[in-house]
Amino acid sequence: MPLRTTRSTRVCLLALAASSAGAPAALAENGVEPIFAAARGYTAYVRTRIALPYIEDEQGAQIGAAFLVDRDRGWLLTNAHVTGRSPGTIEVAFIDGRVRAARPLYIDPYLDVAVLEVADRKGLPDAATMDCGQIPAVGHPVGAFGHPEDLRFTGTRGIISGFTARFGEDRLQTDAPINPGNSGGPLISLETGQVVGINTDQLTGDKVQNANFAVLARQACHILDLLRAGRDPTPPELGVTYFVEYDEPTLTVARLSAAAEGTGLQRYDRIESVNGQTLDWATEGALLDRLRGAPTGTELQVERDGRLVTLKPRLQPALAPMQRQGLYVAGALLAPTNIRHLDFADVQLALMVHFVEDGSPANAAGLQLYDLLVAVNGRRIGSVAELAEALKGVPDDQLTTLEVLRPVDREDRILESVLARIVVDEVEPVGFGL
């Protein structure tokens, strides 16, 4: 059963209908209507356009939701898949229909979370109140707010069904219906009126009913707190992957990459605590949340061969989407790979094909998404800078040979080596701020 994010791509860009602003939030004993009325005020409609997408995104326009969390700063919370992890243009509109330009202030490399900022703060509504405490219990009543299938400023209700990290991130599970267009909207406690999660995705399939998921508000709160303090919320890259056991993630180290150098971690280490404090739950999400903004000298306690060992790892920030840069080469976007731990003795696989323009020279040469760049004209490539240098001065009428490793579905292999010969007629840098 696939996990589907709740975005809507290539939408018809209709004008926003104006309506009256929502009423202030009320106490739970006054019923859920005031809670949804408040959400109607602080929730925004988001429209994103991306011309050159990285692998996580799609080319074109899409819609989603966001909600105001800091009126003075003009900050909104949403999903990273709503803003996109690629450079683009973003507009937001609240219930009054006024369209404001927005820019991404922060996009997380791990959680499906982004923080937007609007410069035009005149007339902004009251911000949502976040619940940054414990995870709501199973059965807790919640409401999801957003724009399902472009039905704007729409609320649904249900309960908290559970908590899971089976699909990568830590997620709240709810049976409150979440559909394409709801992504980035608030999941709200119908007892307190506080936001407990960010609507994110759903399980799809013929036998699936109302298995929907949201990012934990408490983890998004940590990001906001660090940003307000002027600190980088980007989690560290420990350079390890973990074992999965009985379909559930663990914190037992399975593999280490070059990025693990300086952490002191070893295979089969089981991470137990940070600075002597036990993690709230044994998931990578809980660990990375604890390590966001951690100071130099932070300690990890791990179980190794039946004894407790204390490590002081070097904590290097992961490559955040807004720091990523690539090259658009003859219709193909090559940028750092997001595939973890493809380690080979003979090659350094740093760059991947993220996008191929239809009808371009790269398309004609047969380049495909997820192709991993090995060499250009026999010269090994380990970074965007090395790729740019290798292409410098190549005549427009000369064939350039790209060597790539391509994921394949075959009985005898999962990767094959491919040569693509291209006339490089265009080279452009791609990235935020370029």
Image (cartoon, helix red, strand yellow):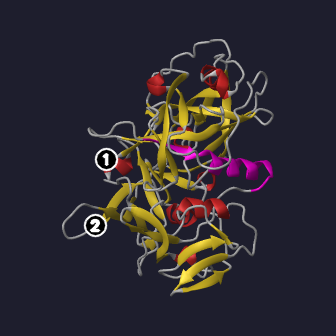
Q: Crowding at label 2, few (<14), some or many (≥20) Cα neighbours within 10 Å? A: few
- Give amino acid for label 2: Ile
* Along the line of sight, the residue nearer the viewer: 322 or 277: 277
**Residue 233, percent from left and from top:** 69, 55
Q: Residue at left 76%, top 27%?
A: 120
Visible residue check, residue 69: yes
Q: Quadrant of residue 92?
A: top right
Q: Residue at left 76%, top 56%?
A: 231
Visible residue check, residue 38: no
**Residue 55, percent from left and from top:** 45, 50
Magenta residues? 212-231
* Along the line of sight, the residue nearer the viewer: 52 or 145: 145
In reply to whether residue 229 is colored magenta, the answer given is yes
**Residue 374, percent from left and from top:** 41, 69
The outermost residue toward the left is: 411
Q: Quadrant of residue 404?
A: bottom left
Q: Which residue is mark 1?
A: 1
- Give amino acid for label 1: Met
Mark in front: 1 vs 2: 1
Q: Which residue is mark 2?
A: 414
* Along the line of sight, the residue nearer the viewer: 202 or 395: 202
Residue 197, compared with residue 333, is above or below; it is: above
Q: Earlier in the sequence, mark 1 or mark 2?
A: 1
Q: Residue at left 47%, top 47%?
A: 162
**Residue 243, percent from left and from top:** 43, 70
Main secondary structure of the magenta stretch: helix
